[in-house]
Image (cartoon, rainbow, N blue to C red):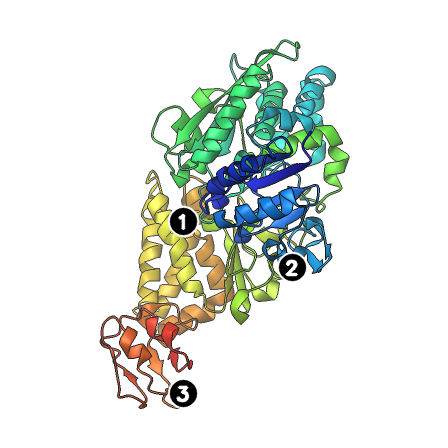
Amino acid sequence: MFRSNVLVCGGTGCTSSNSELIIAKLKEEIKAKGLENEVNVVRTGCFGLCALGPIMIVYPEGSFYSMVKVDDIPEIVEEHLLKGRIVKRLLYKETVVDDNTTKSLNETQFYAKQMRIALRNCGVINPEKIDEYIARDGYEALGKVLTEMTPDELIATMLDSGLRGRGGAGFPTGLKWKFAKASVSDQKYVCCNADEGDPGAFMDRSILEGDPHAVIEAMAIAGYAIGANQGYVYIRAEYPIAVARLQKAIDDAREYGLLGKDIFGTGFDFDLDIRLGAGAFVCGEETALMTSIEGKRGEPRCRPPFPAVKGLFQKPTVLNNVETYANIPQIILKGADWFKSIGTEKSHGTKVFALGGKIKNTGLVEVPMGTTLREVVEEIGGGIPGGHTFKAAQTGGPSGGCIPAHLIDTPIDYDNLLAIGSMMGSGGLIVMDETTCMVDIAKFFLEFTVEESCGKCTPCRVGTKRLLEILEKITTGKGTLEDIDKLEELSYYIKENSLCGLGQTAPNPVLSTLKYFRDEYIAHVTERRCPAGACKALTNYVVEADKCKGCTLCARNCPVGAISGAVKVPHVIDTNKCIKCGVCMEKCKFNAIVKK
């Protein structure tokens, strides 16, 4: 029994900021002070508040240290762990009430409105120790379904819970399982989509890094429901930490008899294997994913037949994503009514979002369905930094759409987002301020989908390329009003005629920005002007003479010598030489340089 437990984030974000070195230094200092039998160091998954990483929490005090550096460790060990004196300078400021009082994380702005179900163990347990998962009711749900429920009763529970797939489309999980169970076959499969390719999305990766056993347990439960004895987790090779922890979790589960033959002595067999993806976005589409697992080029297949009838190796298959699976053990243990009590009428439970962009508190958040965008951005996210104002939020990544500022009070659930031209997607939520050009945002996502199109169908392969060409014309000042009409017409054609979800949703960023920000498109075309000042071809840097002091700082830092002027005399920028790098505006101490 340790008197202190020091939890250090071992997720990808904090690891990239040297949390592994912090853990090593902690153990070194603890040993040097003779505290190795009193203080336990735990490498956890993501705590969520990525903006403040590396993060460390010391229990039982609950002291939340943020942006910890290796050089801070000797002081933490000496003062806090040895002498019992909290190092106040390193505390997360939101937890500090006064010199003598701190508050719990659940009382802070970032965590107060969150409800963790899928993320319940992330940042709490060591994901590489199966005993810690078991200590938090791990594998109890699997034991319950194998010993107390028939497959039909299990599926009825999932249907009653109303759990919808968290990977994008929101298809009812129980219904998918019901179809697969009804299919007659000598072999069935359970697959997990951990491919997660949306720019800025890291929800599934963080769950696998912080709580891999929850996904393993849920996949075994799904196997029992449909009559499958083999599962595959399809995960991109670019997630080395998640892959390593998932493999260890699978190995440990086998050793404990929780995977393999005769689980819990019930005669039920189920095993799991990992298949690595090469990072193709199209392999997030279910049939392309299965084709890739089969060792073929990752291209989508025509549907029907759907995977529940003919999926992996042409056998009935259930495919859900990581976050969907992470909810299932809790639904089994706490009941369908408990899950339905959370969220909205048609969207039950919680949703995990990767919050990024122009926002103070970037990170991973899990909120009940129906939480408004305003609550996520202004309260949990801490608002827009730098005195800027909220302009829009992109949900659903390349498949989603932009939500404008006047719709910030929209409750976030499947149906509300679809009604305003966006979608839930896997859970990326990118916040934008007034310095963001919405035409440029549409172009950014089109560049991604053009690159990621598998090329199998013409509407996607050629159509998205044509969309991108038109957007490039507009953002370089060469577009026409007819181009805007072409954008809209072509977008609808691609949506209606593409083979798979990648092509069918690729035009969404274009259509949503046209719907809510058409005036920006028109300004680019008719005025040859980017209202946000983001499109370089349509932007010039200008010195405002009444503010310029002639300090020469801008001229001395200009990399191409485009600025001229004598000392104490207003300077001038030669727009023909200017490469629009912005260094002059960044260096000017008098705010005399503006973008026009």
Rendered residue at 66%/10% (across/down):
266
Residue at left 34%, top 27%? 296
Q: How many marks?
A: 3
Task: Inspect the image, locate mark 2, and give the three-letter code of the amino acid beneath it.
Answer: Glu
Residue underneath mark 3: 547
| Circle 2 crowding by C-alpha within 10 Å: few under 14, some 14–19, many from 20 | some
Local SS, label 1 = helix
The span from disc 3 to disc 1 (Cα, nearest Å) is 50 Å
Q: Nearer the viewer, mark 1 or mark 2?
A: 2
3D distance between C-alphas at marks 1 and 2: 38 Å
Question: Depth check: 77 or 319 in front?
Answer: 77
Q: Residue at x 35, y 64 (%)?
A: 483
In the rendered image, the quadrant that contains the C terminus is: bottom left
Residue 444, by quadrant, is bottom left
Q: Which residue is tagged 1?
A: 494
The amino acid type of the residue labelled 3 equals Lys
